[in-house]
Image (cartoon, grey):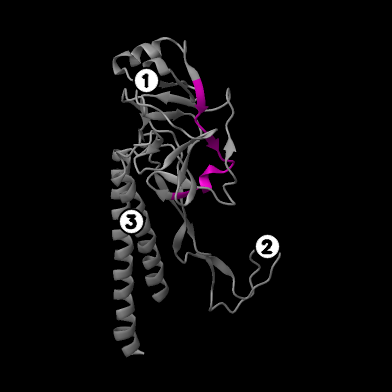
Amino acid sequence: MVRGIYTGASGMIAQQTRLDVISNNLANVDKPAFKRDTVAFKAFPQMLMARTNDDGVTILPVGSTDIRPFVGQLGTGVEVNEVYTEFVQGSLKETSNPLDLSLDGKGFFAIETSDGERYTRNGSFLIDKDFFLVTKEGNKVLGQNGYIQLKHNNFMIDEQGRIAVNSDFADDENRLVQVRENSWKGTEIIDTIRIVDFEKERYLKKEGDSLWSANDISGNPQEQQLGGRAKVLSGFLEMSNVNAVQEMVRMIEVQRAYELNAKVIQTEDTLLGKAVNDVGRVL
């Protein structure tokens, strides 16, 4: 009976972890390029059960002789195996802001932070006071030639991530549309946005602010070359891949499972009380 209490407790702990993950998914449902997390469970090793009061010799299973025949298995609980991220691409939302970039396909933007190089799919970028392309947290976006420096009105970005500028229109906001409609006429390509991928992206470490870091398991970042890379869409943002309705359904499932495990503990406690106070007194 005591074993049943521990089994129910392990289920409650596992469901609490799952609830924390679902709550975090729901909290970031509107965050650009957020990727939902999922919890994977695994069972503790099952125990073999045998008859204790069997004075005969029974051959079970076939080929073995056992005076305490095997009668089944007993589960001993569950634990969290891992929390992993689903890198399914989210929907694309048009913003008409040329500094909003999204990746259509696999890959990550490379970002320079105070802790080293990090990676993101959140392309909600800005231009800082020194005219560098940065994230909203102030981290610089990396191109193949290093930091990307732009003016507000004289650039355009194609689907390969190439950045072109036209100095003739540098101070004329009204002619920005003409720059884009001229199909690169009179422009100069100054850099290409760096896009990387990983052999095992599932094992990237999530660090907050939509940033990821590489490790020995995920492998080093692999540069995506022109012609075989994810499309860079200017004026679009990738939205979160969290489905709020599905997460709410999962939350209800967790609450029901948590209540059932709590009920198991209450029942086991009642049975244990009867065994000690009633059965034990009679014996």
Measure the C-alpha gap from mark 2 to mark 3.
Answer: 39 Å
How packed is label 2: few (under 14 Cα within 10 Å), some, or many (20 or more)?
Answer: few
Is disc 1 placed on a helix, strand or loop?
loop
Asked if residue 9 lies left or right of residue 57, the reply is left
Q: Residues within 10 Å of mark 1 (few under 14, many from 20)?
A: some
Q: Which quarter of the figure has residue 235?
A: top left
Question: What amino acid is labelled 1 in the image?
Answer: Ala
Residue type indicated by callout 3: Ala
Assign a secondary structure to mark 3. helix
- The residue wearing badge 2 is 62
Q: Residue at x 29, y 75 (%)?
A: 270
Tell me residue 263's x, y (percent): 29, 64
Tell me the quarter of the image containing the C terminus.
Answer: bottom left
Marks 1 and 2 in Cβ contact (< 8 Å): no
Q: Earlier in the sequence, mark 2 or mark 3?
A: 2
Report the mark closest to the observer, 2 or 3: 3
The residue that disc 1 covers is 170
Q: Which residues are magenta?
A: 189-206
Circles 2 and 3 in contact, beta carbons < 8 Å: no
> Which one is in front, 120 or 203?
120
- The foreground one among 142 and 25 is 142
Decide if residue 256 is on the left or right side of residue 155. Answer: left
x 31%, y 59%: residue = 258
> Where is residue 27 drawn, in percent x and y?
29, 46
Residue linked to disc 3:
257
Q: Is residue 197 above or below residue 206?
A: above
Residue 3 appearing in the image: yes
Q: Is residue 186 above or below residue 111?
A: above
